[in-house]
Image (tube, helix red, strand yellow):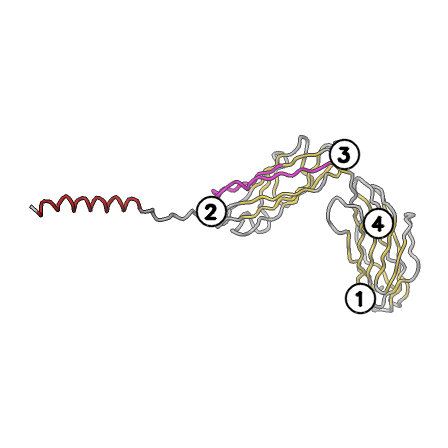
């Protein structure tokens, strides 16, 4: 009798063991390794003139996923009438505004890496100053991503009157030619020119010139554009300032210098940089090192 009574009890224990096992958590399954592209956008203000307006949009694509993205494409959504200016750093369709990174390191974006930065110039119909435009973009890849939540971006930019300084090689020559210095030593005359290719005036101009030891300032500066410069000179350095420069305007300054005698064909450099206190369209330095050659 005692054996018959224990059989149901043992069977009950077995059922309890099975039920308890069913309540245990299943082993965790790791998420598959996938790329994850992230888009970051920025833009200049829209430089707006009488007949043309343009902006520069920068797009940075990072892969914050765990495996490489085999390719990357960006599709822009632009205001009506906009167009692509010039030749962007990616391969772009000028009708659909879809661009693909196919240059430099190739189309693949490695895990933890970035695609070639895209800086693209867009032309736009002229609008009243102060008008705000919206530019949107979406990135994609042929691989499945872990998320597409960071694949879109948007920037807003405003039609503005802004200056943009640009160095000029010479009044009638676009080639940067060497500055001639007499091999016997003595005075030479480097000229520096800058133009305002923007749509608004600068409040002022500032030129910083640097020259090597042995070279000295050798007289008051002159200007054949009528620009009035005020200069302070110290060993190896000249700092000159002038008044406003209108859109399309040109400013020149010739600073007489003297150099010791040298061997024909040998060179030295003079550094120069123009700037203004007025915010410019692009954040790019207007600087160059001019080559001076003994002749």
- In the image, taking residue 280 as reference, residue 111 lies left or right, namely left
The residue wearing badge 2 is 34
Mark 1 vs 3, N-terminal side: 3
Give the class, few, some or many, for how many residues have Cα within 10 Å of label 2's Cα (few <14, many ≥20): some
As drawn, the label of residue 142 is none
CA distance separating discs 1 and 3:
52 Å
Residue matched to label 1: 266
The kind of secondary structure element at disc 2 is loop
The question of residue 76 being in magenta is answered with no
166 sits to left or right of 229 = left
Nearest to viewer (mark 4 / mark 1): 4
First reached walking from the N terminus: tag 4 or tag 3? 3
**Which of the two discs, 2 and 1, sits closer to the camera?**
2
Q: Which residue is drawn at 85% across and 57% down?
A: 239
The quadrant holding residue 164 is: top right
Q: At x 88% / y 47%, what residue is drawn? A: 243
Q: What stretch is highlighted in magenta?
A: 136-158
Element type at mark 3:
loop
Q: Distance between the residues labelled 2 and 1?
A: 57 Å
């Amino acid at each position: 009798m005692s054996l018959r009574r224990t059989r149901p009890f043992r069977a009950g224990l077995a059922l309890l063991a099975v039920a308890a096992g069913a309540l245990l958590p299943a082993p965790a399954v790791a998420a598959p390794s996938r790329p994850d592209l992230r888009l970051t956008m920025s833009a200049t203000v829209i430089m707006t003139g009488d007949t043309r307006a343009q902006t520069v949009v920068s797009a940075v694509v990072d892969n914050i996923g765990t495996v490489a993205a085999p390719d990357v494409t960006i599709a822009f959504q632009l205001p009506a009438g906009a167009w692509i200016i010039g030749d962007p750093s990616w391969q772009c369709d000028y009708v659909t505004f879809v661009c693909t990174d196919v240059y430099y390191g190739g189309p693949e974006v490695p895990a933890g890496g970035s695609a070639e930065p895209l800086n693209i110039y867009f032309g736009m119909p002229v609008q009243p100053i102060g008008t705000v435009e919206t530019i949107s973009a979406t990135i994609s890849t042929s691989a499945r991503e872990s998320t597409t939540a960071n694949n879109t971006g948007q920037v807003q930019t405003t039609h503005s009157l802004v200056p943009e300084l640009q160095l000029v090689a010479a009044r009638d020559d676009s080639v940067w030619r060497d500055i001639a210095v007499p091999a016997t030593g003595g005075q030479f005359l480097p000229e520096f020119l800058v133009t305002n290719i923007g749509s608004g005036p600068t409040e002022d101009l500032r030129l910083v010139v640097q020259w090597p030891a042995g070279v000295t300032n050798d007289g008051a500066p002159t200007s054949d554009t009528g620009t009035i410069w005020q200069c302070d000179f110290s060993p190896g350095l000249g700092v000159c300032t002038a008044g406003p420069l209108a859109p399309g305007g040109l400013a020149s300054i010739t600073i007489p210098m003297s150099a010791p005698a040298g061997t024909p064909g040998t060179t030295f450099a003079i550094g120069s940089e123009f700037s203004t206190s007025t915010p410019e369209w692009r954040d790019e330095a207007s600087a160059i090192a001019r080559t001076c050659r003994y002749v």
